[in-house]
Image (cartoon, helix red, strand yellow):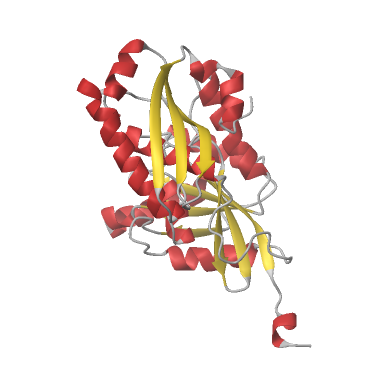
Amino acid sequence: MSADDAKETRCGFCAIIGAPNAGKSTLVNTLAGAKVAIVSHKVQTTRARLRAIVMEGEAQIVLVDTPGIFQPRRKLDRAMVDNAWGGAGDADAVVLLVDGRSGLTEELQKIIEGLGNLRTKAFLVINKIDLMKREDLLKTAEAFNAAYAFERTFMVSALNGSGTEDLRKALAARMPKGPWLYPEDQVADVQLRFMASEITREKIYNRLHEELPYASTVETEAWEERKDGSVKISQVIYVERDSQKAIVLGKGGQTIKILGQQAREDMEEHFGRKVHLFLFVKVRENWSNDPERLRMMGLEL
């Protein structure tokens, strides 16, 4: 038997849950060593579950970046919250990620109550420690562990990577024995069309966060492979009102031109090829309560 044959591989799923804006997508990107999830300072940026693949020794950890858990109001909100708990219920390991500065809020107490319904014990990961005093950090850890019997507690900065190596090793040890589900060099289980839509949505969030809160979504309608190796991508940005369409277009079409340029450059870096991007804006009233639209986004009611 060769040394390779003797290697014992592990593979499993880890769900990362928490309140909106705790830093889940940033942590996923840091652990994966690549930009997989879109990151915005706006809350509830992640809508559907997204999988990132992390290699640690002989273990393959499939991270499930879930939407933030919050009090739902619209059908979109409800689908996002159900999606988050669904990801946690199916996982081999669960991470509750919290912004250490917020402490044990009422919102987080409700999430902790939900942890009791899961078959898997959870790790507590306190994020943004680079912005906290040591004494406040210890008080926060004590409060959370008094509220729930977490298996282990980790203190990290998802932004600069501090403490994430220990977390990655602990997650690897929790993965069940079994073959890898993905090639060793793959970093995400995401269709390219979906990733292209997410890239454009990130640019919209970051540029229009004041004027256009949560009123837009992006769909990649066409993906055309060209003989020269480049790709032509056509996307539709859906908004709910004519006034929002005007915001996305900007004066003389300047805003959508900038959004398109930023998204195209990001796509070319992600896909490693030249991208021809065409953006269109359409009004679809009440799209966030349309079950068919939510299903197309990977959300089920």
Answer left or right for 49 relative to 106.
Answer: right
Up the image or down, 232 lies above or below 211; here it is below
Give whichever of 157, 147 is nearer the camera. 157
Give whichever of 176, 32 is nearer the camera. 32
Which quarter shows the C terminus? top right
Answer left or right for 66 relative to 256.
Answer: right
Give whichever of 251, 183 is nearer the camera. 251
Up the image or down, 274 lies above or below 171; here it is above
The image position of residue 91, as x and y in percent, is 65, 49
The image position of residue 4, as x and y in percent, is 70, 82
Give whichever of 1, 233 is nearer the camera. 233
Asked if residue 279 shows in the view, the reply is yes
Q: How many callouts does the rendering have? A: 0
The image position of residue 260, as x and y in percent, is 33, 36
Answer left or right for 191 relative to 243.
Answer: right
Q: Which residue, as the protein is rendered here, is positioned at the far front? A: 227
Q: Which residue, as the protein is rendered here, is positioned at the far left? A: 251
Asked if residue 141 shows in the view, the reply is no
| Res 116 quadrant in image | top right
The image position of residue 121, as x and y in percent, is 63, 52
Which quarter shows the N terminus? bottom right
* Rendered residue at 22%/28% (across/down): 254
